[in-house]
Amino acid sequence: MATTIITGRDITISLASTNYAAQTLSITLVNAPVITTYQALTGKQYKHIDDQWTLNLNLLADWGATSSLFEAMWTAFTSAPNTALAFTMVTATGASFAGTAFPVAPTAGGTAPDAQTDTWAMLCASTPVITIT
């Protein structure tokens, strides 16, 4: 089987139905399993009890731009912080990851002479669904 190489440029990201791939510098969907350890008489026993998924985005700031992602996220965070936003991450090879993640408060500011960027770690409301087409 030939090796398939997928780069970050092969990924698109949509939040609340709007594509923000052009201002996304990097994106990862990460799971941190919750595993409980029990000490039995025969040794350690492990039980996987939950999964905690996080959608990590590194973005170019767009404060003041038309249809600003940062302003939309600020509004979502300040008005409905307990309402998860739908996201879809699609690779060029046909893998699609869909789920919902809670809004975060974007950072304002930057470092001269660099572009203004921000990194968001959005807690997912549940396990994302993967679809292969």
Image (spheres, rainbow, N blue to C red):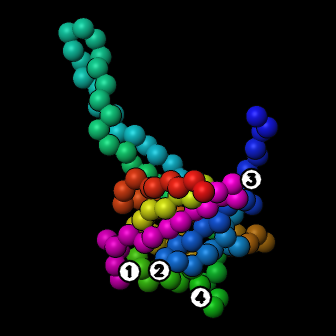
Q: Does 72 appear in magenta?
A: no
Q: Secondary structure at mark 3?
A: loop
Decide: marks 2, 1 in contact (CB < 8 A)?
A: yes
Give the labeled residue for mark 2. 74
From the viewer's perspective, is the residue at label 1 or at label 3 nearer? Answer: 3
Residue at 36% from the left image edge and 60% from the top image edge: 125
Give the labeled residue for mark 3. 7
**Residue type at tag 2:** Trp
Residue 49 or residue 57, whichever sits in front: 49
Q: Secondary structure at mark 1?
A: helix
Location of residue 69 by image quarter: bottom right
The answer to whether residue 19 is above or below residue 53 is below
Give the labeled residue for mark 1. 78
Location of residue 133 by image quarter: bottom right
- Ranked by sequence position, the earlier of labels 3 and 4 is 3
Q: Which mark is residue 67?
A: 4
Find the distance from the CA under tag 2 to the CA under tag 1: 6 Å
Name the residue at the top extreme.
42
Q: Is residue 130 left or right of residue 110?
A: left
Find the distance from the CA under tag 1 to the CA under tag 3: 34 Å
Q: Does 80 appear in magenta?
A: yes
Q: Is residue 109 visible?
A: no
Find the distance from the CA under tag 3 to the CA under tag 4: 27 Å
Q: Give x and y (percent) for residue 75.
A: 44, 83
Q: Give x and y (percent) for residue 93.
A: 69, 54
Residue 32 or residue 120, whichever sits in front: 32
